[in-house]
Amino acid sequence: MKVMKFGGTSVGKPERMHQVATLITNETEPKIVVLSALSGTTNTLAEISHQLSLGYKTPAKKKIDELEAYYKNFVETLVVTEAAKTEAAEIIAEHFDFLNIILKISYSDALNKDILAQGELLSTKLFCVYLKEQNISHTFLPALEFMCIDENEEPRLERIVRRLNALLKDNKSETLFVTQGYICRNAREEVDNLKRGGSDYTASLIAAAIEASVCEIWTDIDGMHNNDPRVVDKTLPIEQLSFDEAAELAYFGAKILHPTCIWPAQQKNVPVKLLNTMQPNAAGTVIRQEAGSVGVKAIAAKDNIIAIKIKSSRMLLAYGFLRKTFEIFEKYKTSIDMVTTSEVAVGVTIDNDLHLAEIITELEQFGSIEIEKNQTIISIVGNEISRTEHVLQTLFNSIKSIPVTMVNYGGSAHNISLLIPSDYKKETLQLLNKGLFNL
Ligand code: ADP
Ligand code: ASP
Ligand code: MG
């Protein structure tokens, strides 16, 4: 059995949904199809939720109405029979009734998660209406019945395995299952999600849970490119990546993959393929245990980074200092990306400023604190990259004009990371594209 995940743009237009139906019925291997919300929907839901959190009901209502009109228009082209149109209209009415009801109740974080879940609930149900109209036999698997996270917002893999396999066992003869990406239940059994872009994570968790033959991530580009195609003009797809390389790229900003979506597939050694819905015959990228080659493969950039420098001549020589420092970040559930140390200072970066004020207050007991906001981590990723000849020389020769704030080298054999002010991101990515890839 395999997993096929289709992202927002792959289901964002009626004709794309039709194409997805063709793609999933082209071959006979049993499959679980994971769908995202239609492109733009989760952003709109997040805006509605934000407005409601501020008490701005009128603009929220306007957005809800516009979104409803968009969906009504969408199903006009999605399906043709009266029966299917009626069914689709009922689904839309159900979900927009919900959104209109929340205008009248008080806002909470749990409600926010409910609002954000509407996109995947709608896309999967409407897709199933189309499949039914086409007489394509399938079973709908509600993600809220098996996808779950614990109190630390980590997936409960064992429970997912148990629940999902029980659902599959109930439908033994079925060869096509459809489910939602992104949404799940949390430790309080409320509706929650796997964070933005989380449908990839759903796909990988399902792939691990059923030990799938492959986890296919279908999107709007022909695989992982060597550099960010949104920023740099000339980029090329990469044929093969190891799990470790892909995980580093995803974590450090390659938007094509959710930051932590590789580990479940890696744990069960399920290959992950990145494929293009618009160009289904393109080779794409395969991610597996083996890297395929040695050396620089790709560059990714992660924005909104904060650098924190702790300066102290007193504490650093004392052992236990780093532990005490890191414990503060642990206490506030704030993960550290980059670390550098010198005799008198420790520099770290974080991407989550939720508890920045508390962290700074606690760190001040160790020395003076310097903060630099609006930083970007540029990660250069490749198998055994840190042992590749001349890589550092070529790297720094190509970015002579860039004021680098911090460097991480040697921690991972697959990654060299630079911290730069975000204003220099585009220039840095372009210079590295020329210097490292001659593109
Ligand atoms: P989906 O909606 O299918 O999940 P995403 O928008 O999340 O799609 O991811 C695909 C997008 O990721 C591409 O359109 C591309 O702009 C962006 N992207 C960023 N970095 C890379 C990269 N290194 N390789 C390929 N795509 C990338
Ligand atoms: N719909 C969600 C989002 O936009 C999840 C996803 O697309 O992966 O973040
Ligand atoms: Mg995505």
Image (spheres, helix red, strand yellow):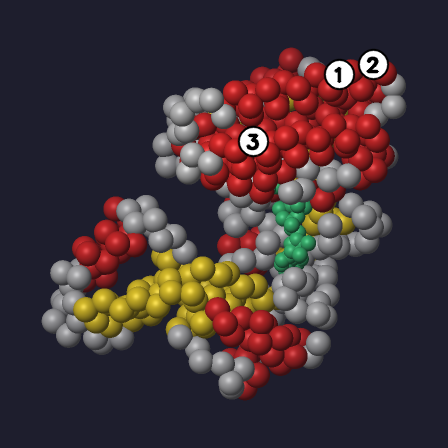
Name which quarter of the figure residue 307 lies in: bottom left
Q: CA distance from mark 1 to mark 2?
A: 6 Å
217 vs 331, left or right, is right
Q: Pinpoint residue 172: horizontal percent, then vertical percent.
A: 70, 16
Q: CA distance from mark 3 to mark 2?
A: 29 Å
> At 69% from the left edge and 79% from the top edge, which residue is drawn?
438
In this view, 167 is above or below 351: above
**Residue position marked by numbered label 2 in the rendering:** 83
203 vs 423, left or right, is right
> At 39% from the left edge and 73% from the top edge, which residue is drawn?
406
> At 55% from the left edge and 54% from the top edge, which residue is drawn?
250
Q: Pinpoint residue 431: horizontal percent, then vertical percent.
A: 60, 79
Q: Pinpoint residue 430: horizontal percent, then vertical percent.
A: 62, 75
Secondary element at image label 1? helix
Mark 2 packing: few (<14 Cα in 10 Å), some, or many (20+)? few
Q: Pinpoint residue 425: horizontal percent, then vertical percent.
A: 53, 71
Looking at the rendered structure, the kind of residue marked 2 is: Ala
**Residue position marked by numbered label 3 in the rendering:** 61
Report if the beta carbon of the residue with label 1 is closer than 8 angstroms to ligand 2.
Answer: no
Q: Do the residues bearing badges 1 and 2 touch, measured as CB atoms within 8 Å?
A: yes
Of residue 412 and residue 117, the one placed in the foreground of this image is 117
Secondary element at image label 2? helix
